[in-house]
Amino acid sequence: MAEELARQIVKNVRPSITTGGSRRTGFIVLTGTSGKKDEKGKATVNNMKDLEEFTYNPIENGLLEIDNFYDKKTEGEEKKSIACFVPAWKFRIMDNDGNSLKQESIDNWNQEIALKQKKDQAAYKQLEPMETTDMFNIIPGGFFGDYISDKCNRARNVIITHKYKQAVELGYLNWRDPRNPQAGVEWEPNEEGDVFILAGEHPRKKVTQLPGGKEKEESIEGLYLQGTDSYDFSEANTSDSKLCSLIFKMIDKSKGVYNPEMGIMNNLVAGYIGRPTEKEGGTNEAYGNAAKLSVYYQVWNLIEYTKIRIFDAYESWGLEGFLAPRPDLVVVANIERSLVSNKYGMPSSLIPSMLTKLKDWLMVEGNIENIPFEFVLKAISSFKRTHHYNCDITMAFCCIMAQLEEFLINEEENQNKEKQPPETYKGYYKTIGGRLVEV
């Protein structure tokens, strides 16, 4: 069953199993397979979004709800309820009366999985899940390696099974004056919105005291980075790519690292992913959402320089000041300077180097665990560096890595300058006409 049809099927079938008085007269049973890979080499488990939604949000989807005591629990953490789930130990080994022998079944399951190679164990868990999260994990084998893929799966499992980890706000960013984008934007909370912001991570401001007891709010320079992977046409028969724009928060130097007001640091806090149809506004709507994030967070947007119509959009709105210039320090450190000519954006020739930088960043303890968006973790885990595979999220993240690397190189150069001894003056003076003159 194709995932895009799952919700529609339930919506169409539900009236046939209820009476006019809403009395249930039957049950809906959805049966399907995840398959292996599609024609582009993507694991189709990535396309089970609706079934995953049914599993973890049963009440919202009109499904039977049960307590989630199947997934491993960390002491003190609140878990979400789930839809009906039959773990692999049930009906595996039974007594003469048909009762499942739990421990014997678990032991048998462990013996079976131990006989398989590591690369095959994840696929086996999808077919014979002990926990709900086993069904939706990404099978290892992606670009970043099994270690990172496994950490992404585990971090994602925590998010989708724990309510307190899902504090993400959805909404719209609206121009204050559509005729003057430079007038700023306003946030409109809306569950149907396509801009996502981690709760509590709207733009941080610094407050300056003015004469007369008044206060002035200003953006904190250098606190945020923005990376974007774009496209040029609203609809295309040969591509399913979307525009992805991500906001990354650095360390707020005005607060101590352990200050509770610091919030998340050195990680993602907001973004937009979408490809509006022509009826929905097309490329203008998508580019506008990226630009609104730039204005809202007062940040330079580094855009991958392959699909370039978005640069024209920024300039037509008078927002070229929000386009991040080419990261020359990173270019010089990684590729031949003669290979690039663009004024703004990240040249595509930098992608291989930035993928390596992203991998290094993911290997740092705590970085994966603190990524707050489960779909980002899924994208990283399943990313493949092949001709037909496209991952807008990973490419946007690479643009952020280029800015982060540019910042670090610049910081190191400034520190080296500070360590250098002051230059000694090598000139001399002589008396000319009774006056001391520098020669």
Image (tube, helix red, strand yellow):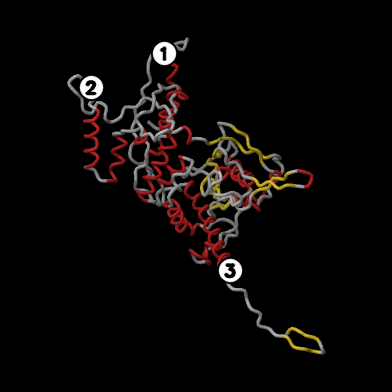
Please, what secondary structure does the residue beneath circle 3 have?
Answer: helix
Q: Are marks 3 and 1 in contact (CB under 8 Å)?
A: no
The residue labelled by disc 3 is 417
- Crowd rating for badge 1 (residues with CA inside 10 Å; few <14, some 14–19, many 20+): few
Please, what secondary structure does the residue beneath circle 2 have?
Answer: loop
Which of discs 2 and 3 lies nearer the camera? The answer is: 3
Residue 409 drawn at (x, y percent): 53, 62
Per the rendering, the mark at residue 99 is 2
Please, what secondary structure does the residue beneath circle 1 have?
Answer: loop
Q: Quadrant of the C terminus?
A: bottom right
- Left or right: residue 219 versus residue 230 is right
Which of discs 1 and 2 lies nearer the camera? The answer is: 2
| Residue drawn at (42%, 40%) of the image | 156
Seen from the viewer's position, the closer of residues 243 and 231 is 243
Residue 377 drawn at (x, y percent): 44, 43
The residue labelled by disc 1 is 24
Relative to residue 2, is residue 203 depicted above or below?
Answer: below
For marks 2 and 3, give the CA distance.
75 Å
Seen from the viewer's position, the closer of residues 163 and 176 is 163
Tag 2: amino acid: Asn
Q: Earlier in the sequence, mark 1 or mark 2?
A: 1
